[in-house]
Amino acid sequence: MLPLGAARAAQPVQINSPDGAVRVTVDLTAQGQPTYAVRYGQTELLQPSRLGLKLAGADLSQGLRLTQADKPSTVADDYQLNTDKRAHCRYRATRRVLHFAGAAGGPQLSVIFQVSDDGVAFQYLIEGPAKDVQRITQEATTFRLPGGAKGWLHPHAKAQTGFANTQPSYEENYQRGIAVGTPSPLGQGWSFPALFQTDGHWLLLTEAGMGRTYCGAHLAHESAGGEYQVAFPQAPEKTTPEAALLPESPLPWRTPWRVLVLGKSLAPIVESTLTTDLSAPTQTPVLPNAPGKSSWSWVLMGDQNTTYDVQRRFIDYAADMRWQYCLVDALWDKQIGYDKVQELAQYARSKNVGLLVWYNSNGSWNQAPQTPTNVLFEPESRRREFARIKQMGVAGVKIDFFGGDGQSFMNYYQDLLVDAAQVGLLVNFHGATLPRGWNRTYPNLMTMEAVKGFEFLTFDQRNTDQEATHCATLPFTRNAVGPMDFTPVAFSEIRGKQRRTSNAFELALAVLFQSGIQHYAETTEGMAAQPAYVQDFMRSLPPRWADVKYLDGFPGGYAVLARQAPDGRWYLAGINGTDQPKTLQLDLGKLGLSAGTVITDGDTNRSFRTQAATGKTLNLTLPARGGFVVRP
């Protein structure tokens, strides 16, 4: 332990954002514990919070001294992205590296901060002479929210619970506006991303830059005094009993980024690209025409309709709607067969539609019976299968039912992406973890579920009853950190459940939610029953978006966003997640809009009406659980 005087001698170090609004202060306690605090202007968003790591053979969370604070430098990065909220991404940040010394001869800790106008990110660097593999047993990182702050938080599930032992897969409803420090209801903490409001400001916590030498993390169950600590996965969350759960790596070793998106309004939360800004650039070929829209029979029609004739109809449906894909879900290998799927793929190509097929991810971690199963986990089997279906004409795969966030699972995800890219297959992960910026590093990753999606509405009326408030939460939480395969838009009724949302609400989700490939829930018959102008709207949507703007909203209440097509035209969408009417006054002028077509609720919640939008202001009153879109 250092003498108290020596520990106190170091002066606090500051890192400021390029515009000067965001300020991070790093200090040491008397016990040599590094801390950091975050201010936006004059407002303290994070009180002094802990930094550091505990290794199996060294404690790098206390008894430290600051040996050097490098001079601030500028980070500048401009890149293209096809599968997220913005096509042309621009990142500017102030970078500063702080070096700490612990026990002589042991591993040494540095903390790398990058502070941008829309947030704070930091990661750890461990260096030292050791040649053997090092192991992290605990991360001391905390986020201490001021008293009075409120959170919109996703309960982290207990491992090996849920359908066929498939949790945790980020498929709960968010707790909305709860007091900081509230224990999680499932006893396992809170998932990333975590949204907080404090003193008129917003703060979103998540992680990014996930490589192969770390596990996925979340926030711990207990958060006394509003101080949330980073927590590691539960014991079962690994691919095999012998595989890595907690982080392990030789030195030098960089951890993923801890990310704080922040601002005075919700605009930075919705518009920020920090999760991809902080992730590794791609080393594999980019497929510029890969994003798109897809038809999909399963969610409203079930397993029994994964048949040749039905899927051929859904290929025709996709072609008629000018969508790029058709997804053939589980059991295709049994109910259609490889030879007939090859026929479907060839037929789809004749219609300018790509065929996507489903797989079960499982090795030993889940008991889900849906097939194809037990063909992707072993590398040789996986590569043979990928090569086979690519030769058949398949465009991509949906892989389901993963088993957690251990380091071995982080590697398995990336192994799948690398091997799929080698043969030119697109990837959609379901029953899965968060994207964490992987869609930049692996551009064949189109989307990930990691959300309580539309399929849950078919399982239980309670889920259906909560759809409106759940959907009004997601633009500010899950979908703010990467593409999200919610599988939206159903005008039909839902397998015997009573849908509470209006048809205009469902239509709005086609724009409100972002996914590299957007799989629509509605069937051929349900779409054909809608007015021609609704069908034309669904045909008009571009395969990808170029930009996003937050216009109005509040998590769980309502949400209004604008998304820009690659040709520069703006589409608007909004939903009311409440049980009362909501009046909106939207400034179209700041988007450069002076005219457009509005589609919103008709006389009933199963009908539409349309009107012209003229002038720079749009005034609308949305009914309970209603919605609207504006097309250029």
Image (tube, rainbow, N blue to C red):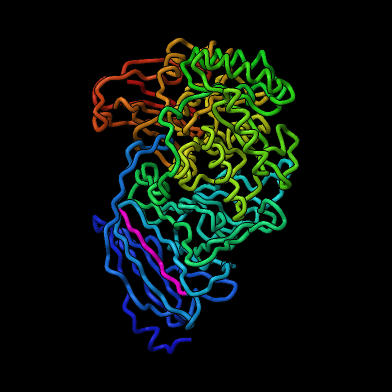
Instruction: Describe residue 207's horizontal placement relative to residue 39 as left or right.
Output: right
Q: Is residue 13 above or below residue 470?
A: below
Q: Is 555 in front, or is 518? A: 518
Instruction: Tell me residue 227's x, y (percent).
Output: 50, 65
Q: What span is colored magenta in the figure?
A: 108-116
Residue 536 at least partly seen: yes
Instruction: From the viewer's side, name the closer residue of 420 and 387.
Output: 387
As displayed, is residue 134 above or below residue 178?
A: below
Percent position (x, y) of residue 451?
Answer: 56, 40
Left or right, 161 with respect to 420, comes to right
**Is 409 placed left or right of 606 in the picture?**
right
Residue 479 position, x and y percent, is 47, 40
Quarter in which the C terminus is drawn:
top left
Coordinates of residue 103 in the picture (x, y in percent): 49, 82
Viewer-nearest residue: 347 or 379: 379
* Residue for point 48% across, 45% down: 438
User: What secondary structure characterizes most of the magenta part?
Assistant: strand
Is residue 270 found inside the magenta-colored segment of the image? no
State the residue at coordinates (32%, 16%): 612
